[in-house]
């Protein structure tokens, strides 16, 4: 019997047009292996609603979009037998890059035909799932600013970062990891399931989505003139050698911050209270990975 695949396409993710994606699916998906359907989303949470109805009925549900679209769809099928596929179309594509999925649309569709399925961990922050990265501090602030912009894409994200970075002030946090308490003043706290934010920017180079642990990455305030050095370390996977970062691994994380404010889950902003509860859910999501993973 053929496998059944559902492609859910977010038409606005990454600021990139996707009118030609159905034709690329037809050309590059092995139709001897798959029967497939395609649905375009028409608003916030629509992808999650479609995927929830598809869970258990399809062998794979494919997110055609960025990390936010991936989060919506994965949140609906996590814990089911339906596998997540990804055709990357976002600004960062963090999870897709980590899983070795090609950034080229035709190649990523062809990767789905190979059907290399792995089971990975997911995280929960105040009960909401994330799969690549969650966080608070400056990156959550930028996610909030970015969400209100009219333009999407990597260059817009970089522009927002450069505009905001000089005015953002670090906060004090109480961080409890598996019962051990740490008090830190931090510029960013990222909770990493995979190694990277996106665009091959690696905040936790040794992270694994299959080790049953989350990496609490604490970035302290650093001088502005160090920004290029930090950027190079993030790209070269050497950030752990910097004295401005500390990584603590654990399963259950409680964070108390000075006040309510933004957090992000896979790049999508939410406003939450001062108390944040985070935990790992091991082996909870089936994903189709690339040849290099």
Image: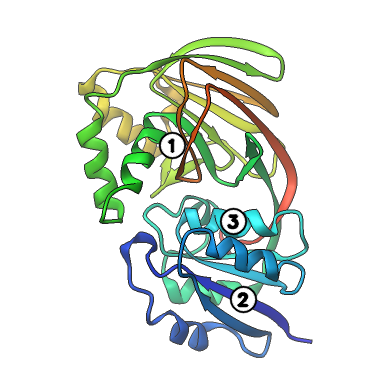
Query: How many other residues sit within 10 Å of disc 1, few (<14), some (14-19) or many (≥20)?
Result: some
Helix, strand or loop at label 1? It is loop
Of discs 3 and 2, which sits in the foreground?
Answer: 2
Q: Position of residue 26 (x, y in %)?
A: 51, 88
On residue 237, the disc is 1
Cα separation, mark 1 vs mark 2, equals 35 Å
Q: Quadrant of residue 3?
A: bottom right
In this picture, is 73 found above or below 31? Answer: above
Mark 2 is surrounded, within 10 Å at the Cα level, by few (under 14), some (14 to 19) or many (20 or more) other residues, namely many
Q: Nearer the viewer, mark 1 or mark 2?
A: 2
Image location (x, y in percent) of residue 87: 50, 67
Mark sitting earlier along the chain (3/2): 2
Residue in the picture at 40% in, 52% down = 92
**Which is nearer the eye, 111 or 128?**
128
Ranked by sequence position, the earlier of labels 1 and 2 is 2
Q: Is residue 239 above or below residue 71?
A: above
Q: Which residue is tagged 2? A: 6
How far apart marks 3 and 2 lie (CA) works out to 23 Å
Q: Nearer the viewer, residue 12 or 216?
A: 12
Q: Quadrant of the N terminus?
A: bottom right
Q: Which residue is mark 3?
A: 293
Residue at the (52%, 52%) spot, across then down: 95
Q: Secondary structure at mark 2?
A: strand
How many marks can you see?
A: 3
Circles 3 and 1, Cβ within 8 Å, touching? The answer is: no
Q: Which mark is residue 106?
A: none
Q: Residues within 10 Å of mark 3 (few under 14, many from 20)?
A: few
Q: Secondary structure at mark 3?
A: loop
The residue depicted at 28 percent of the width and 28 percent of the height is: 229
The answer to which of marks 3 and 1 sits earlier in the sequence is 1
Q: Identify whether 198 is placed above or below 290.
A: above
């Amino acid at each position: 019997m053929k496998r059944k695949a559902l492609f859910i396409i977010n038409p606005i993710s990454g600021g990139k047009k996707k009118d030609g994606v159905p034709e690329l699916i037809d050309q590059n998906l092995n139709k001897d292996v798959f029967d497939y359907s395609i649905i375009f989303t028409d608003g916030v949470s629509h992808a999650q609603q479609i995927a929830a109805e598809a869970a258990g009925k399809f062998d794979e549900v494919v997110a055609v979009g960025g990390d936010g679209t991936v989060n919506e769809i994965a949140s609906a099928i996590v814990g089911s037998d339906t596998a997540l596929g990804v055709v990357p179309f976002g600004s960062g594509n963090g999870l897709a890059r980590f899983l070795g999925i090609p950034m080229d649309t035709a190649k990523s569709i062809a990767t789905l035909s190979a059907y290399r399925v792995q089971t990975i961990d997911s995280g929960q922050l105040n009960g909401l799932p994330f799969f690549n990265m969650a966080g608070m501090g400056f990156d959550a602030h930028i996610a909030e600013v970015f969400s209100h912009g009219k333009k999407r894409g990597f260059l817009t994200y970089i522009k927002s970062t450069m505009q905001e970075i000089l005015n953002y002030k670090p906060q004090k946090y109480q961080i409890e990891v598996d019962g051990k308490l740490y008090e830190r003043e931090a510029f960013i706290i990222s909770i990493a399931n995979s190694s990277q934010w996106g665009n091959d920017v690696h905040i936790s180079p040794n992270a694994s989505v299959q080790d049953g642990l989350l990496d609490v990455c604490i970035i302290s305030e650093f001088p502005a003139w160090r920004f290029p050095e930090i950027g190079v370390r993030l790209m070269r996977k050497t950030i752990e050698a910097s004295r401005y970062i500390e990584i603590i691994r654990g399963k259950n994380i409680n964070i108390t911050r000075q006040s309510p404010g933004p957090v992000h889950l896979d790049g999508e902003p939410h406003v939450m209270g001062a108390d944040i509860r985070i935990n790992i859910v091991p082996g909870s999501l089936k994903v189709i990975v690339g040849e290099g993973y």
